[in-house]
Amino acid sequence: MGPIFVLGFLLIAQSAYAQRSPTISYISQEQIKDIGGTVELHCSVQYAQEYPVLWMKVDHTSNSYILPISTGSSLILHDSRFALRYDQASSTYTLQIKDIQETDAGFYQCQVLISVSNKIAAEVELQVRRPPIISDNSTRSIVVSEGEAVQLECYAGGYPPPRISWRRENNAILPTGGSIYRGNRLKIKQIRKEDRGTYYCVAENGVGRGNKRNIAVEVEFKPVVTVPRPRLGQALQYDMDLECHIEAYPPPAITWHKDGIQLSNNQHYSISHFATADEFTDTTIRVITIEKRQYGNYMCKAANKLGSDEDYVELFETVIPVCPPACGQTPSGETATPTTSSIVLLATMVMYIFRNFNTKH
């Protein structure tokens, strides 16, 4: 009875073994690799000797996209970067990918096909480290009016997911405070003209040197007019330059006025504008060969679509010519020998001598 019992037990065990369903006993964990590197994905199966075992690349964003790579121990995909090994002892199928490309990232699925409508599967994700690339939907430049709320946006692709930070040119203080702000959106509640300039969106993820984009922020604001020298003196028949500085964006219309009349270029006045930057302009009016009626207050006015501003320069009479601009200049119609100042000085000396003479007598 002993041998018969043993034989019966073996037959029952063999039958049970033949009826066991295939299983995937091991699949590689998530893999993170650099571009150009090599990865090996392992899939160990049990009780699958009679069934096809496949490696597939699947796209979860589109259920219709499935790329077959191998079946059994043979490659289906003809790509020299892919290789397949089968270890019979452990029943392990190893898929190797060399010279990894960004497009290799995704999910790789190990499948055991039991029937047309039945399969078992396990998958592993391959993540490819990629340097940051700032997306096109990020802010490139912006023009706003002073006092408005502003939001600058910056997004970047890459793996691991990039970190976004904001800086200003020359590490100037950000409107949010501090020299660095972290986050995809930089919000400014009420922008000021001092906030205009170049902002940098920086994306970093430890791969490569990161990525940076310059964002030009233009702030439109009403003019601010300042006069460096509010009172200027000059002698009759000499020239004098009156100046004012204007800060405005967009660039303003600039005019000079006296006694309610707008002045223009003629034989009495010469007006010049010098733009030192988009928002800075210096303007000068030269009063030519000054006459008595040209003394008084001159108004410098600047206006753009956001408003206007003005300031005043007083031109008053002096006895002695002021240099510059009178250096080497002689009054119109006279020679260099008696100048107005020398005549006045001579007359003063004569009066002084005459008074002393009368006092003594």
Image: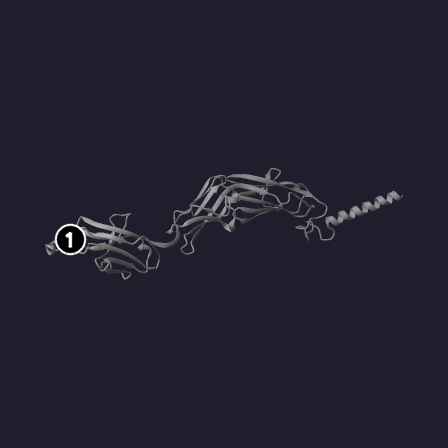
Element at badge 1?
helix
Q: Position of residue 332 (x, y in %)?
A: 68, 49
In the rendered image, residue 253, in percent from the top left (x then y), is placed at 53, 43
Q: Extreme right residue here?
A: 361
Mark 1 burial class by Cα count in 10 Å: few <14, some 14-19, many 20+: few
In the image, what residue occupies the spot 26% across and 51% down?
122
Q: Is residue 156 above or below residue 95?
A: above
Q: Does residue 143 appear to the left or right of 276 in the view shown?
A: left
The count of marks equals 1
**Left of 66 or right of it: where is 158?**
right
Residue 137 image position (x, y, % from top left): 39, 47
Tell me what residue is drawn at x 54 percent, y 41 percent: 223
Pick the front one: 249 or 50: 50
Residue furthest front in the image: 1
Q: Given the image, on which type of amino acid does mark 1 rest?
A: Ala
* In this picture, residue 146 sits left or right of residue 263: left
208 or 42, which lies in front? Answer: 42
268 or 163: nearer the viewer? 163
**Screen quadrant of the C terminus:** top right
Which residue is pictured at 46% across the width and 48% down the height?
166
Evaluate whether residue 251 shows in this view: no
Q: Which residue sits furthest bottom?
A: 80
Q: Of residues 267 and 324, which is closer to you in this image?
A: 324
The structure's colour scheme is one colour
Q: Quadrant of residue 86?
A: bottom left
Can residue 283 be seen from the camera position used here?
Answer: yes
Pointer 1: what residue? 13
Give residue 313's quadrant in the image.
top right
Q: Position of residue 1 (x, y in %)?
A: 10, 54
